Amino acid sequence: MRQDTRMKYELGGYRTVESPSHRPHAPADAISLRAVSHSYGDLRTLDSIDLEAPPHSVLGLVGPSGCGKSTLLELICGLREPTAGAIEVGGEARAEGRLARCAFMPQRDLLLPWYSAIDNAALALRNQGMRRREARAAATGLFERFGLAGFEGMRPSELSGGMRQRVAFLRTLIAGKPVLALDEPFASLDAITRAEMQEWLAAALRADPRTVVLVTHDVEEALYLCDRVAVLSARPARIVGELSAPHPRASDRDTAVTDPEFVAAREEAMRALREGSR
Amino acid sequence: MRRWLLPLALIALLLGIWQLAASTGAIADALSLEDFLVPSPTEIASSLWDSRSLLAENAWVTLREILLGIFFALVVGAGFAILMHRWQLLRDAAYPLIVASQTIPIVVISPILLVWFGYGVTPKIVIIALICFFPITVNVLDGLRSVDPDAVKLMRSLDASRWQRFWRVEAPAALPNLFTGLKIAVVLSPISAVFAEWVGSSSGLGHLIQSDTANYQVARQFASVVVLSAMALALIGLTALAERRVVRWR
């Protein structure tokens, strides 16, 4: 119960700083995939995928589990090379170039247990050569803005699941890259925390827009958070549907997901998903 | 409280029985031995006190051998594990040999080491290090390999160099395993030290036990054993303490 009020308070506190004076500071890149195919040895995972994401847009990738969504995300991030086809992120086609432009958030939070919450969040700054004190100072501002004030010195094991995901997301954001690649960021959370985190992420992205690729198996999550949603088929994954999320969306999740236009889009996505799974 | 009290009570009981059996001559009679060959706990305690400077002197020699042996095992063992982790070719080539090398009884090669390194402290350190090297290397390598592949991807995406990946993810992840190996090494090291001294030496607890055997100084032999176990227990305790201080996230 206490936890709930605290989160509400923090979300509220966060909204107050989301003023017009605060505007995007990180650049955003366009992403384009042309006829991208991938296989692990004989196992074909992706079959001729074409995708476009303009700068500052949020692209959702939805598909049945094991269809290759995560592989697709790793390809975009430059963590892998496709077997065929071309991927460009901000005009960079080489894997190292893409890796330099994308920040990857893996499925599990993977916070390092030997670092405090703030040191985990500031990991990218430390890797980029910043001193510990400066990196902490830079991250402290974000902790305050994103409802994590007071949690800086805690170890990951002392944080709740939702808090851990927030720290993990901040770690991705702080890297300062034009593209955020999020792999099912909320899959491990319970329904209530997940809904809260979706609102939190939507607000965070309004405050600090980047180009985002979000992998999820939750159609509702994709339509609530993304501008466009690509529906993938079972392996080898093809694109079986592409829809635009209804616009404008209410920032309040409960209002947004009960909007008739939203419900219609969700049904359409579900239909594509069902057909693609066959 | 109970954790300490029960074992202490059991030790007191066992010592009491021993005291009774030794001072009445029951054990000596049963083994058909002279009484002085079966010292009672009080006799061992007085020998411990009477020979305290001799015991301390030799204990220091053995302790130094142990510490140096473990130090070299740690540096070489952890270093080699890191190299094998870094270069798969080296791991594929060397790892089977390291495992196979454990079939070589150190007993057999220690006289050779004595010939090579002389009578001094060096062959003891080499023998201890050879025995302690294996658990450290194997455990550290295991720890380094246990790192989540997703954590490596994450670090690559967060602009970490190979070196940063090692120091910020792989090395801390392997630390608990390093301590597991170290604890095994610490348990093995006093036995290794005594054994190394038996092969040839002029000082140390192992040497003292050996020369006391020749002189039927049975009470002092027991006293040496008491000192040796106390030393081993202290080392194990210190290692556990260091682990708790260093691996605080567990």
Image: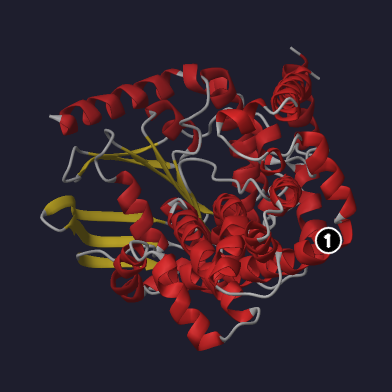
Left or right: residue A49 compared with residue A153: left
- Say which quadrant the N terminus of chain A sits in: top right
- Tell me: residue A177, above or below residue A159: below
Rendering coords of residue A168 (x, y %): 60, 45
Assign a secondary structure to mark 1.
helix
Rendering coords of residue B191 (x, y %): 58, 56
Q: Residue at x 20, y 58 (%)?
A: A38
Rendering coords of residue A116 (x, y %): 73, 47
Which residue is more in the foreground, B157 or B7?
Answer: B7
- Tell me: residue B145, above or below residue A188: below
- Tell me: residue B236, above or below residue A159: below
Left or right: residue A200 compared with residue A89: right
Residue B126, image quadrant = bottom right
Q: Chain of mark 1?
A: B
Can residue B159 be seen by looking at this rendering? no
- Say which quadrant the C terminus of chain A sits in: top left
Which residue is more in the foreground, A92 or A174?
Answer: A174
User: In the rendered image, which residue does mark 1 sit on?
Assistant: B56
